[in-house]
Image (spheres, rainbow, N blue to C red):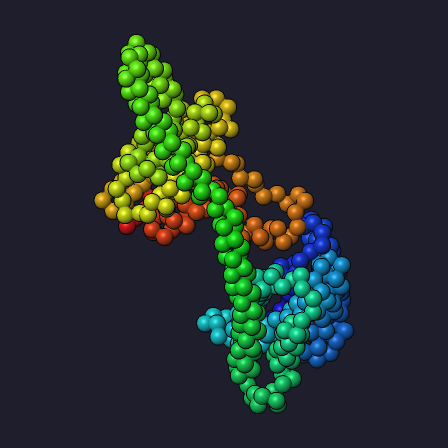
Amino acid sequence: MVYFPVLLFCTAGLFMALLQERYRMLATVGIMAGAYIIAAVAASLLGGKFEGPVISIHGPALAGTLILLAASVFVHQNNILQQLFVALLSMANLSFLMLFLPLLLGAMPFGVAGAPGGVISVLATLLFFLLMGLCLYRPMERFGQRGPSLFLCGMTVLSLILYLLCIGKLDMVFGLESPGRRLFLAALVYCALIFCFRSIYQAGRWQSQAARQESREKMIALQSADYLDILAAVRQVRAAHKNGEYALDTVAQLLRDGQEGEVPDYIASYKRTALGNPILGRYNENPYLNAVIATKAAFAAQNRIDFECNAAAMEVPVRTAELCIMTDELLTRAANDAAAWEGPRRLRFTAIPGEDTLRLEVVFTGELPKREKFSIKGRQFRDLLNWLFDDPAPEETELKGLDNSAEIVLSYSGSLTVSEAEDGVIIRAALRF
């Protein structure tokens, strides 16, 4: 047994889930709710106007579906073929349920007369429409902005064939002699329909991912200047140390010229300059990694950030380039956030090598961005579905600015976490090898 209010409610939900609305969510829900009420009343009034076991149910249901289709034309921006497909799919679902529910109720090990049968029928109707929505949500979302296509024409015709098959109009064509065989063939047609949609969707998704990968490679090429900055930092540190060698040459020249009295003053002046320059510090034995840390220490000094580093030894089987990129991203994220903090600013970088692990920790003063709570105000129904099913963009998560580090950590089966600590924010990156 199928109840018109439940059936039309599921049909309205299918329209809203598979199609893209023009207006905000409250307006869309309001219009479709009004259309649903009108459709339910019309179906109830037409319930006794048709004679016959099939037309008495399908006639009122078709009238209600047409009312919802008319409302959908004004509410949704999909082309008319896509909306017609959803309407035919809803009618095919009705015919399939009319075929499936009697067999389901007959297979129950308990009596289904009265309320139990009604409850089972309602639950089966809701679950079946929900299953169809989940299977077709992504494909319809991806191709919702496109115009009519030959593929969608074929799927619409397939939905019509499915409808006629379930009501028994094609029994002679396929040689079907029992409802069980008809149900089995209808299930195969449903599987074929979903398979076609999902195959096209996956193909389009693969092309999109390939395009994004190509775009990412181009962006990496454009951002190669960032990696050249690491090499520039190495040269800058080397130049600073070379200045120290020049200072020794200057002292030697002063001694040769007999100006011994000026040597102590010159050495004291150079020491004061060297102590005030963080870029001359020794933070790591690796000159490239030391240069990266030194430049971030200089940035911290310019922004009045108390910088501490405990990463002198880091003998691990990780490529220097990967260590430099990770350290640069971690310290850049921490230094930028700490520089924006009002109050005492601190940044502590620690490298903890182990037998088969390497853990990098950055603790800095700051706070994690507060996630904006989802509100229906000014939103569309599609936004609600995306909020339910989609992952947030990397720019909106705690891993902002750590994309390359996340990929490196993943390649070493490690972990990358950002969390709040008592004295600020802590970023932990763990590599396993």
Q: Is residue 257 left or right of residue 20?
A: left
Position above or below: 371 against 44:
above
Q: Is residue 113 visible?
A: no
Label tally = 0
Residue at horizontal 31 percent and vertical 30 percent from the top: 282
Quadrant showing the N terminus: bottom right
**Furthest residue toward left:** 355
The residue closer to the viewer here, 334 or 366, is 334
The residue closer to the viewer here, 326 or 204, is 326
The residue closer to the viewer here, 178 or 214, is 214
Residue at horizontal 58 percent and vertical 43 percent from the top: 374
Residue at horizontal 59 percent and vertical 74 percent from the top: 96
Q: Position of residue 54 (x, y in %)?
A: 67, 78
Q: Is residue 110 visible?
A: yes
Q: Quadrant of residue 263?
A: top left
Q: Position of residue 337 (x, y in %)?
A: 48, 32
Position above or below: 431 against 52:
above
Q: Position of residue 336 (x, y in %)?
A: 48, 32
Position above or below: 418 against 41:
above
Q: Quadrant of residue 171?
A: bottom right
Q: Position of residue 241 (x, y in %)?
A: 34, 29
**Furthest residue toward front:** 257
Q: Is residue 117 left or right of residue 361?
A: right
Residue at horizontal 69 percent and vertical 66 percent from the top: 147
The residue closer to the viewer here, 86 or 399, is 399
